[in-house]
Image: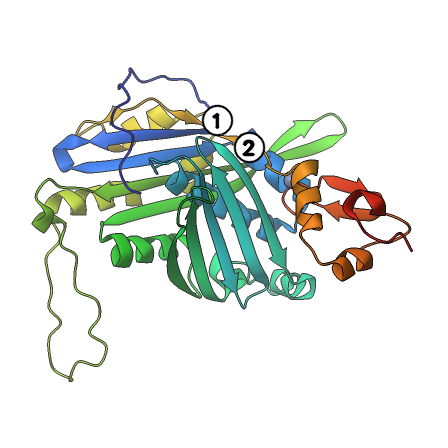
């Protein structure tokens, strides 16, 4: 899930800021690869539709960027689903990416606890998530087995979880930065705001694998006085991390700064090549047919219980689309 689509041709940088794209790039002199995600209308549409409290929206926006970043790197047809399950005020985040660029997302949270978190100013990602896990699932259809990667969330951010995942599961040195913000604009009748989100992922992929060695995991129960086994990091990766650590959140979401300018700003010294960007759009995959099939899969008793005021109403949690059925349509009793 790490390498950009290298079969696509590179192209000359564009100065235009383009939203809702994923831009893969390569810094071959340092054996670095990465991708930039810039989301404007896509993330605004997803977050506005839900009207979650701002800190919940911001957290979900981060999850959207991370999911698009990882999902777009997979050379597969099918879906990539990222889901958190934690004990904090935000119990669950679900982001569902369908190749090549369709995304939808929703959150479940405890209103009272989120209000408390806002009142006490404890709205950092780690505070809202709490402890639990993050699962990443690749679903290539009923014929294929599902692949699931799990990583613990222990009060940290989604960036921390991504680092942990690549460290333990893929063993690829990786840095991820995520940013979400509201762009405020003067409009007639008062100020308006739009959500924007962006992120960058940088990975160290040297041709000789021993250069990608990472420090050993904390030995934990090692006897006191035993020095941990320390492997010095490769100079190229040290430089890559230093460069990516200079990115400001504002740069990741600045509507006036194109992804290519940003990549160039960061990596012009070692030299950088960008590849053809991929587009992203906000689109739900729900349909009346799918909801009907789902309802028909329930037991007779469950279907009968769903009838309210003479009809069955189902609202999609991702896009809020509402589907209504007469009881007879799905074989339920209309009583
Ligand atoms: Zn939907």
Q: Is residue 183 visible?
A: no
Please tell me in which quadrant of the rendered image residue 239 appears: top left
At x 36%, y 29%, the residue is 23
Along the line of sight, the residue nearer the viewer: 77 or 63: 77
- The reply, left or right, for residue 292 in relation to residue 59 is right
Residue 305, compared with residue 190, is above or below; it is below
The tag earlier along the polypeptide, 2 or 1, is 1
At x 73%, y 46%, the residue is 315
Q: Is residue 220 visible?
A: yes
- Which quadrant is home to the N terminus? top left
Residue 4, compared with residue 18, is above or below; it is below
Q: CA distance from mark 2 to mark 1?
A: 8 Å
- The reply, left or right, for residue 136 in relation to residue 10 is right
Q: Which mark is residue 42?
A: 2
Name the residue furthest bottom.
223
Badge 2 vs badge 1, beta-carbon distance below 8 Å: yes
Query: Where is residue 295 drawn, in percent x and y?
Result: 71, 49
Where's ligand 1: which quadrant? top right
At x 14%, y 49%, the residue is 212
Local crowd size for mark 2, using a 10 Å CA cut-off: few (<14), some (14–19), many (≥20): many
Along the line of sight, the residue nearer the viewer: 241 or 25: 25
Mark 2 element type: helix
- Which quadrant is home to the C terminus? bottom right
Q: Which mark is residue 89?
A: none
Q: Which mark is residue 19?
A: 1
């Amino acid at each position: 899930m790490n390498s950009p689509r290298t079969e696509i041709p590179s192209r000359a940088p564009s100065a235009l800021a383009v939203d809702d794209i994923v831009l893969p790039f390569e810094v071959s002199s340092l054996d670095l690869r990465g991708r930039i995600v810039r989301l404007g209308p896509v993330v605004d549409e997803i977050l506005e539709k839900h009207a979650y409290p701002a800190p919940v929206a911001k957290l979900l926006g981060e999850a959207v960027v991370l999911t698009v970043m990882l999902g777009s790197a997979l050379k597969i047809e099918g879906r990539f689903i990222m889901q958190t399950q934690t004990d904090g005020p935000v119990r669950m985040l679900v982001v569902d990416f369908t190749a090549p660029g369709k995304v939808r997302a929703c959150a479940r949270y405890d209103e009272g606890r989120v209000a408390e978190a806002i009142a006490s100013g404890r709205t950092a990602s780690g505070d809202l998530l709490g402890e639990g896990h993050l699962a990443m699932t690749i679903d290539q259809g009923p014929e294929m087995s599902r692949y699931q990667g799990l990583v613990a969330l222990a009060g940290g951010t989604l960036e921390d979880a991504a680092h942990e995942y690549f460290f333990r599961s893929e063993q690829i040195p990786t840095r991820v930065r995520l940013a979400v913000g509201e762009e405020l604009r003067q409009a007639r009748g008062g100020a308006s705001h739009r959500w924007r989100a962006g992120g960058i992922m940088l990975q160290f992929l040297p041709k000789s694998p021993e250069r990608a060695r990472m420090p050993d995991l904390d030995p934990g129960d090692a006897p006191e006085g035993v020095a941990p086994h320390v492997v010095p990091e490769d100079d190229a990766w040290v430089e890559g991390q230093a460069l990516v650590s200079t990115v400001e959140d504002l740069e990741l979401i600045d509507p006036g700064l194109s992804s290519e300018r940003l990549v160039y700003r960061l990596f012009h010294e070692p030299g950088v090549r960008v590849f053809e960007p991929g587009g992203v759009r906000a689109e739900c995959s729900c349909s009346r047919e799918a909801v009907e099939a789902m309802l028909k899969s329930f037991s007779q008793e469950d279907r009968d219980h769903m009838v309210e005021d003479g009809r069955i109403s189902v609202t999609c949690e991702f896009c809020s689309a509402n589907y209504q059925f007469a009881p007879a349509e799905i074989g339920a009793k209309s009583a």
